[in-house]
Image: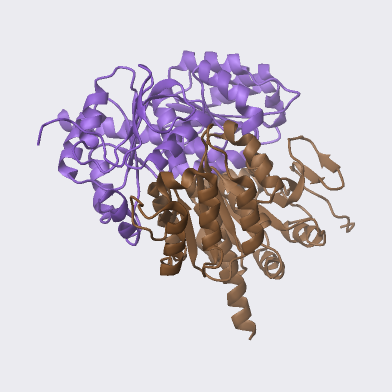
Chain colours: A purple, B brown
Amino acid sequence: KYEIPVIGPNTHGFSNFHKDFHSIFWHFDTFPGEIAVISQSGGVGLTIACSLRTMMCGLSHFVGVGNGAVTGFSDYLQVINLDPNVRVFSLFVEGLENAREFYECARKITAKKPVVVYKAGKNEEVAKATLTHTGSLTGEYDLYRAMFKQAGLVEVDSAWDAAVASKALAMLNLPEGDRVCAMTFTAGLSIVAMDRSLDAGWKFPDISDHARQGIRSVIGEKTPVELQNPIDLTGLGFLPQNYSGVLEVLRDESFDAFFLVWSFNALIRIPIAEIEKFVKDVKKPVVMVLLANQYEAERYLEELARRRVCCYLTPEDGATALNALLRRYKMLNRDRKVSN
Amino acid sequence: KYEIPVIGPNTHGFSNFHKDFHSIFWHFDTFPGEIAVISQSGGVGLTIACSLRTMMCGLSHFVGVGNGAVTGFSDYLQVINLDPNVRVFSLFVEGLENAREFYECARKITAKKPVVVYKAGKNEEVAKATLTHTGSLTGEYDLYRAMFKQAGLVEVDSAWDAAVASKALAMLNLPEGDRVCAMTFTAGLSIVAMDRSLDAGWKFPDISDHARQGIRSVIGEKTPVELQNPIDLTGLGFLPQNYSGVLEVLRDESFDAFFLVWSFNALIRIPIAEIEKFVKDVKKPVVMVLLANQYEAERYLEELARRRVCCYLTPEDGATALNALLRRYKMLNRDRKVSN
């Protein structure tokens, strides 16, 4: 009526962490970063923010959309998109009043920046509960899903996965194809990661004879398992110089992405500097998985984040990260083909 | 040939944490607890163990089955089942040589103790990679799935979820029905939890007029949202005495399980003692969700675990926990009906 933009009502508020501006009623632990969380629920937005903090990722903005009487997702997306600090948007959507407007706006943004979306209300019975909350209907999930895909969004299935995907998209270069190389000490981890990443379209082409020879020259001829992709270094890889030696061999192999596993042990140094160098050299996405519990991993996750190495603690999270990158690559590629 | 049980080959080893007996080549951070992890992959078993440690759960045993030349899952299950320290089995299965033997053995154990299973190799292409690892085929996932269900196992989709489900089944009483009551400050969290738990068969029946009146007498008449289940206390619930006052009202309502949300804030005390008392009084499963990042949550998770309050950091994990309990209840109920 008066053309004044109003946030909410029934909202968590708005924060810009780079400007240290906060119009918010609930403070939480984070630091300035590259991810803007825009959430229709303060609580779910908070869960994404806390999950990102656990993964050592900061935020650029936090918005609780609330009932969105005047301003909606499109308004926030457009305004925050002007801020060069933002590399990724991470959205939680219950339902949209104006899906067409959202679609047009999101479509423009995803051409430049990745947008991750987590949608509530897949179950129709939940619609009733949502209606009393923000007054929006959550039904017709399939329509939403198709719209998200068409608009180039990366959809995920939980607040944690929203954080996993946002972290990868903020920290990593995109692949320029679908060929991934996995390197591990224990095949089981690559099996569960492959399960998920093959379904998403990643391929695990075999390594070349040249690479096989190169790896043998580093870890020796007598490997207890066959050398193939996923590359299982077994115990022989647990010397940091062997690990980085094999990375050196793989550098020029024709893969589009790498999935590296390390397992924390108090007696063996994690080759952090070597992995950092590899990431910088290959200029391709490298997802690292460190097997450790969250508390013993904390200082390593901190150091890895500082060196811009993207690391997770489970192989399934690593696969979710890889899959987000591939979906983003395919989306941009689809658009490029369309415009040619 | 010589009838000597052999573990492995190609195995991570065997540990009994209550006896401090370790025949294992990789030490990791844990403490004696109630969960036995039996994994065909040392790496995935380690991921489950690390995830449990992050959730403040200890282990009774850890077994790397490896190639299982002589001993297999059934042997470990039977032997470890004799140990009264074990409350829950948590399995990672790539493929089974003798599925019939496994089925018969698991069926007997699940009549007494919960068994959680995570299966690899859902994608047929992964079978090749698995074959070079432990020599077992991973195909025919649908057959496995039906067999697990028939044997009364609780199947999960990731190492993390195996830890989430195992923790709940180790710490909580089983429900005696499917009616759950959710209490939250922010509806979004209950919406995403409902999404998952409705699909799994939980019902969220409305609270009685009597309970509604009781809650109003605690938090006041003027609530900004309608009082229904999920119960959204909004800001009014953030006084610990209000929170525990409402729990007191709900105690005698006819629910079979409770889903309680708290959000960490440095300025407001978490009503830990009050929640502990509620859990002891109701003798029903109570799943708590604490919104916080893993590092700030550490000391609270430790205290909650000591007081045997089962807590997670995301609503989706809370729903996974609830769903594991309901599946276990339904399985035991099915068997009871069959035997009558």
* Horizontal side of residue A308 vs B86, given as left or right: left
Q: Which residue is pictured at 32% across the width and 39% down the height?
A: A11
Q: Quadrant of the C terminus of chain B?
A: bottom right
Camera-side residue of B54 and A254? B54
Q: Position of residue A156 (x, y in %)?
A: 39, 42
Residue extending furthest toward the bottom: B340
Q: Nearer the viewer, residue B50 or B71?
A: B50
Residue toward you, A78 or A156: A78
The answer to whether residue B239 is visible is: yes
* Above/below status of A140 relative to B175: above
Identify the image quadrant of the N terminus of chain B: bottom right
Residue lying at 49% horizontally and 35% vertically, measured from the top left? A51
Q: Residue at x 31, y 47 (%)?
A: A94
User: Which x, y percent locates residue A232?
Assistant: 62, 33
Q: Is residue B98 above or below residue A290?
A: below
- Residue A138 screen position, x and y as percent: 28, 53
Could one spot residue B93 in this view of the protein?
A: no
Direction from residue A188 to residue B201 in the image, left or right: left
- Residue at coordinates 68% horizontally, 42% vertically from top-left? B303
